[in-house]
Image (spheres, rainbow, N blue to C red):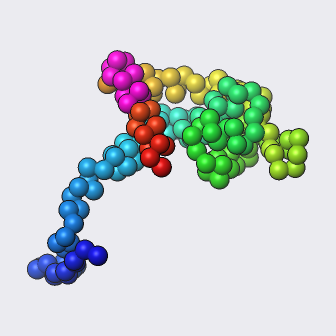
Amino acid sequence: MPDMKTTTKTGGKKSQAEFTDIALDECLDCMCYEFRKTARVVINFYDDALKSADLKSNQFLILVAVATMQSTNFKTLAEFLGIDQSTLARNLVTVEKQNFVTVKPGKNKREKIITLSRKGRQKLVSTFPLWQKAQSDLVEGIGADKWRKMKAEMAEVAAVAREQG
């Protein structure tokens, strides 16, 4: 186990631990840290762009996915969105309460089928221009070629993480 010594800073500040055997600054060059930090900023950007439609970016993406898939079950939708089923269930509650999607039993009692409602279609159509502007602003800001390369690189990182995990 790494050595840890506790020191007290002068000036009445809280004591802090100093790690002598590990280089914690390496953690600040962490892929996870950078992806999370970037994701929060980008998600907030899209959330702000969709605010006037009273929709969050994760809700918008659920509507897009359900519309794209037409009618789907939880497992397939979660895989399509790249999230686990419990996260999908939490995110789906709001759009279901707003009557943007319907969730009905499938062929067996455990399966649930998700379909975009008429109100959901209308919401998607009215919100799409807001998303489109946000997307365009970001892509123009970094450049279309750079965005294509970044998508490919992120896919590569995800593939390596899946392979290693």
Give the dominant element type of the magenta stretch: helix, strand or loop.
helix
Q: Position of residue 107 (x, y in %)?
A: 88, 41
From the viewer's side, name the closer residue of 142 and 5.
Answer: 5
Q: Position of residue 104 (x, y in %)?
A: 84, 42
x, y percentage for residue 103? Answer: 79, 42
Residue 24 lies left or right of residue 46; in this view the side is left
Q: Which residue occupies 16% across, 82% down?
A: 8
Viewer-proximal residue, 4 or 134? 4
In the rendered structure, the answer to whether residue 140 lies left or right of residue 96 reads left
Q: Residue furthest left?
A: 10
Rendered image quadrant of residue 53: top right
Between 10 and 21, which is closer to the camera in this rendering? Answer: 21
Q: x%, y% of residue 149?
A: 36, 24
- Is residue 90 at all visible to an observer of this figure? no
Q: Quadrant of the N terminus?
A: bottom left
Residue 134 seen in render: yes
Left or right of residue 107, residue 27 in this image: left
Quarter of the view holding residue 65: top right
Q: Residue at x 81, y 45 (%)?
A: 111
Q: For the magenta stretch, what is the residue range?
A: 143-153
Residue at 52% across, 26% down: 130
**Which one is in front, 1 or 77?**
1
Residue 145 covered by magenta stretch: yes
Queried whether the magenta region covers residue 83, the answer comes back as no
- Determine which quarter of the picture holds residue 124: top right
Q: Is residue 164 above or below residue 60?
A: below
